[in-house]
């Protein structure tokens, strides 16, 4: 059509690293991989911030995606700064940095520090892109139309879980990003309502696009590999699984207390295997509680696992338990359904919408409720079988290709393109809450 761009070129800001970021890394990985497999005129520039991020995301990039490390590009652009002495600004900054940092420390003791929103230095504008997407919370003010994923506003609901300076930084950056973005993308209706309420943004500006199981795009894992992982990690014959970074809102302490009660009051010993980074300073509290409750032989924290190890650990789990206090949606729940693992889940925030009838829900703030839920999962084999079947059916409601197509529609809209029937249909559909509408219906339009 007249005036319509021949193609859309999208810059995607990659500033997340597996092993520290939790579900946001997996969600970013799944989206990049799915976008790279779509056919169409779109081109993507994946802008990483570190060489490690470059090595990671390049594994999932497709033929329509170029990976650029911003740090490496910036150095290449500045060229031989040392050879040109102090004539280049970069060289000046390197020489003066120690003195400047010392001044900042002194001034910082005298005046309060206020968080600021980063301003683009022109790098993104120089890429020839039509749209800039921030799929995780980092953000900068830029001249391009911006798509922003805040994921959640947990800092406003649980400020006690974060240092005051971090709460202030998040509030300044998230609020500015949501106000300035052309489109805010969230995973669930619960988060959409929260963003609208907290930041006074119009509902038309907030687009719901549910995620999908990250493990769906992992390599196949054989039974032999699963058994090798069991022996190497010395896993118990049966265990409950909780994959989560040890952030306070993940609620490890209440889960440990519930397992101790099951052991001491009901004589039911439940092994627990936890994966994910050990985030300090909260990890120290978790570790101390394990020791205080005498659970060293009952609880295992494996840390960050490879994709193959993670799939194997899921396959061997008796069930997934997720006592989180705050989620936009949960990657572990998607993964459990994908791997045929029954789920017991917290009933807080967006989780009831995500699970539907495919999980045993409990109040994660009530240790007694966690005790009852875990007890039922351990002792009721019929319940576990029913939840596996429900999870299998519920997993069909989420698909990375559909998710990627919805994001592509958002990019096209931000770039000023006229949307096709499928684009419009996807942006009108919240398939988390309306799973009865299948993708096949779009093919009849």
Image (cartoon, helix red, strand yellow):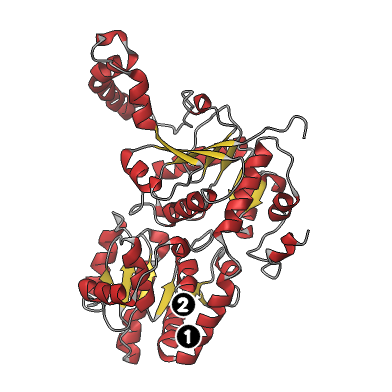
x%, y% of residue 149? 54, 46
In the picture of the structure, the residue carrying the numbered disc 2 is 340
Residue density around tag 1, few if under 14, some if 14–19, many if 20 or more, within 10 Å: many
x%, y% of residue 41? 61, 40
Task: Please name whichever residue, 92 or 25, is drawn nearer the observer in this view of the structure.
Answer: 25
In the picture of the structure, the residue carrying the numbered disc 1 is 384
For marks 2 and 1 on the same chain, the one whose residue lies earlier in the sequence: 2
Task: Please name whichever residue, 111 or 404, is drawn nearer the observer in this view of the structure.
Answer: 404
The quarter of the rendered structure image containing the C terminus is: bottom right
Q: Is residue 387 above or below residue 36?
A: below
- Residue at (57, 62) in percent of width and height: 399
Which one is closest to the eye, mark 2 or mark 1? 2
The quarter of the rendered structure image containing the N terminus is: top right
Q: From mark 2 to mark 1, how far is it between C-alphas?
A: 10 Å
Counting the numbered discs, the total is 2
Name which quarter of the figure residue 378 lies in: bottom left
x%, y% of residue 242? 38, 70
Task: Please name whichever residue, 152 or 423, is drawn nearer the observer in this view of the structure.
Answer: 423
Task: Please name whichever residue, 294 or 21, is drawn nearer the observer in this view of the structure.
Answer: 21
Q: Is residue 147 above or below residue 262?
A: above
């Amino acid at each position: 059509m007249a005036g319509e761009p021949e193609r859309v070129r999208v810059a995607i800001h990659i500033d997340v690293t597996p092993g520290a970021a939790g579900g946001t890394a997996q969600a970013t990985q799944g989206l990049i991989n799915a976008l790279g497999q779509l056919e169409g005129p779109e081109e993507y520039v994946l802008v990483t911030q570190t060489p490690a991020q470059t090595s990671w995301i390049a594994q999932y990039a497709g033929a329509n995606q170029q990976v650029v490390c911003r740090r490496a590009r910036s150095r290449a652009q500045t060229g031989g700064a040392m050879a040109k002495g102090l004539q280049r600004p970069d060289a000046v900054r390197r020489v003066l940095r120690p003195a400047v940092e010392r001044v900042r420390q002194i001034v910082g003791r005298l005046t309060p520090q206020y968080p600021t929103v980063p301003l683009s230095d022109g790098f993104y504008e120089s890429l020839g892109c039509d749209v800039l997407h921030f799929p995780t919370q980092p953000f900068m003010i830029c001249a391009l139309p911006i798509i922003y994923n805040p994921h959640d506003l947990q800092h406003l609901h649980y400020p006690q879980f974060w240092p005051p300076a971090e709460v202030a930084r998040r509030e300044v950056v998230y609020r500015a990003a949501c106000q300035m973005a052309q489109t805010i993308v969230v995973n669930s209706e619960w988060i959409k309502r929260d963003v609208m309420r907290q930041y006074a943004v119009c509902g038309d500006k907030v687009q719901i696009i549910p995620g999908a199981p990250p493990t769906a795009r992992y390599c196949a894992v054989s039974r032999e590999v699963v058994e090798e992982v069991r022996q190497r990690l010395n896993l118990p014959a049966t265990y409950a699984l909780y994959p989560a970074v040890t952030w306070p809102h993940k609620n490890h302490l209440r889960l440990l207390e519930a397992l101790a009660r099951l052991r001491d009051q009901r004589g039911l010993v439940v092994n627990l295997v936890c994966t994910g980074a050990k985030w300090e300073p909260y990890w120290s509290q978790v570790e101390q509680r394990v020791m205080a409750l005498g659970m060293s032989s009952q609880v295992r924290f494996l840390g960050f696992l490879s994709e193959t190890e993670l799939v194997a650990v899921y396959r061997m789990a008796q069930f997934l338990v997720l006592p989180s206090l705050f989620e936009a949606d949960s990657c572990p729940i998607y993964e459990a359904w994908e791997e045929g693992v029954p789920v017991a889940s917290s009933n807080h925030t967006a989780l009831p919408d995500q699970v539907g009838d495919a999980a045993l829900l409990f109040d994660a703030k009530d240790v007694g409720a966690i005790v009852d839920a875990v007890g039922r999962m351990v002792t009721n084999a019929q319940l576990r079988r029913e939840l596996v079947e429900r999870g299998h059916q519920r997993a069909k409601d989420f698909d990375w290709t559909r998710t990627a197509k919805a994001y592509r529609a958002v990019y096209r809209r931000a770039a000023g393109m006229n949307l096709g029937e499928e684009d419009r249909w996807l942006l009108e559909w919240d398939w988390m809450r309306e799973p009865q509408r299948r993708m096949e219906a779009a093919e009849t339009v």
